């Protein structure tokens, strides 16, 4: 018969082993609920309308519980991203690189329907070339815009062209600065440039290489089983007309499994974070 004193001793001896076992289980067992954070690229109501059918179907078919999380601004989203609380995130490749370097997130799927390219525009009647922009003022929509700012600046710097950036706030303003002569050139993308009212007064003088579209990424705490199931879900949706329509709504048309080295390593190599607002943030390094 074990005495009361010996019972207490056994409890204290076994406690570290119990805590270690419990901690290991939490890190390796599937969670009961996951959070998918969506970058605020549109109003929350529109994001909910687009994403809910895709995630509801996955939850129902796999008995999972992924909850969508929305944000009122980029600043709030960025703070949440850096916290590492999100299990899954859908955002631009810049945010993926940021999350990978901070917490080790990995890409799961992305659209293979098109690529993202940045452009530089200049006055139509000018003879300015890329090398002429070294040391000159160039307008950009915002500091953290991937294709229209970070990607462009990284490529220019790799070619020895260091510009003086002027962040105009929007794509339209970037083009408008050039139109009004407030900047020698301006960054953007073809879609927004084609919508610019005074487009005929400007011309494209530089186009970046193509970059794969936004990836769906996962925190390393998510089990391989869940990640593989989510990848399979997106690929399976693409096998039906109804599924293809759903994928277009969330901008993952023609999905393929994403690969860091093939798709996004170039952003690491170009060290795009050095041009972002996170260039001096604690814990963020190349």
Image (cartoon, rainbow, N blue to C red):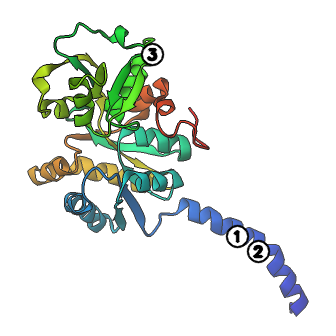
Q: Is residue 15 left or right of residue 61?
A: right
Residue at image point 9% right, 50% down: 241
Q: Which mark is residue 19?
A: 1
What residue does disc 3 label? 158
At which x and y percent is residue 87? Answer: 44, 57
Give the quarter of the image for residue 204.
top left
Measured along the vertical axis of the image, is residue 217 above or below residue 195? below
What residue does disc 2 label? 15
| C-alpha separation, residue under disc 3 versus residue under disc 1 | 51 Å
Among numbered discs 2 and 3, the one appearing first in the sequence: 2
Judged from the image, the secondary structure of the residue bearing numbered disc 1 is: helix
Q: Is residue 39 left or right of residue 96?
A: left
Residue at image point 28% right, 49% down: 41
Measured along the vertical axis of the image, is residue 263 above or below residue 169? above
Q: Is residue 64 left or right of residue 7?
A: left
Give the quarter of the image for residue 206.
top left
In the foreground, 184 or 230: 184
Judged from the image, the secondary structure of the residue bearing numbered disc 3 is: helix
At which x and y percent is residue 228? Answer: 38, 50
Q: Are marks 3 and 1 in contact (CB under 8 Å)?
A: no
Q: How many marks?
A: 3
């Amino acid at each position: 018969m074990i005495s009361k004193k010996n019972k207490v001793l056994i409890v204290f001896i076994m406690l570290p082993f119990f805590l270690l076992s419990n901690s290991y289980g939490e890190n390796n067992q599937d969670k009961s609920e996951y959070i998918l954070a969506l970058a605020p690229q549109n109003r929350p109501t529109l994001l909910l309308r687009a994403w809910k059918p895709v995630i509801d179907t996955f939850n129902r078919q796999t008995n999972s519980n992924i909850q969508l999380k929305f944000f009122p601004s980029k600043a709030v989203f960025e703070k949440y991203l850096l916290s590492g609380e999100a299990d899954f995130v859908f955002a631009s490749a810049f945010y993926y690189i940021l999350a990978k370097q901070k917490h080790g997130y990995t890409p799961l799927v992305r659209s293979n329907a098109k690529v993202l390219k940045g452009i530089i525009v200049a006055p139509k009647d000018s003879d300015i070339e890329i090398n002429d922009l070294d040391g000159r003022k160039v307008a950009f929509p915002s500091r953290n815009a991937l294709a229209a700012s970070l990607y462009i600046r990284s490529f220019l710097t790799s070619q020895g062209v260091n510009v003086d950036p002027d962040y105009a706030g929007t794509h339209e303003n970037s083009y408008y600065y050039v139109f009004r002569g407030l900047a020698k050139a301006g960054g953007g993308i073809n879609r927004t440039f084609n919508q610019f009212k005074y487009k005929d007064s400007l011309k494209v003088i530089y186009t970046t290489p193509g970059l794969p579209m936004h990836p769906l990424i996962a925190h390393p705490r998510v089990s391989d089983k869940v990640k593989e199931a989510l990848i399979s879900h997106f690929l399976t949706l693409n096998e039906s007309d109804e599924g293809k329509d759903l994928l277009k709504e969330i901008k993952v048309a023609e999905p393929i499994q994403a690969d860091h080295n093939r798709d996004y390593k170039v952003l690491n190599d170009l060290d795009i974070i050095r041009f972002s607002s996170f260039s001096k943030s604690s814990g963020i390094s190349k």
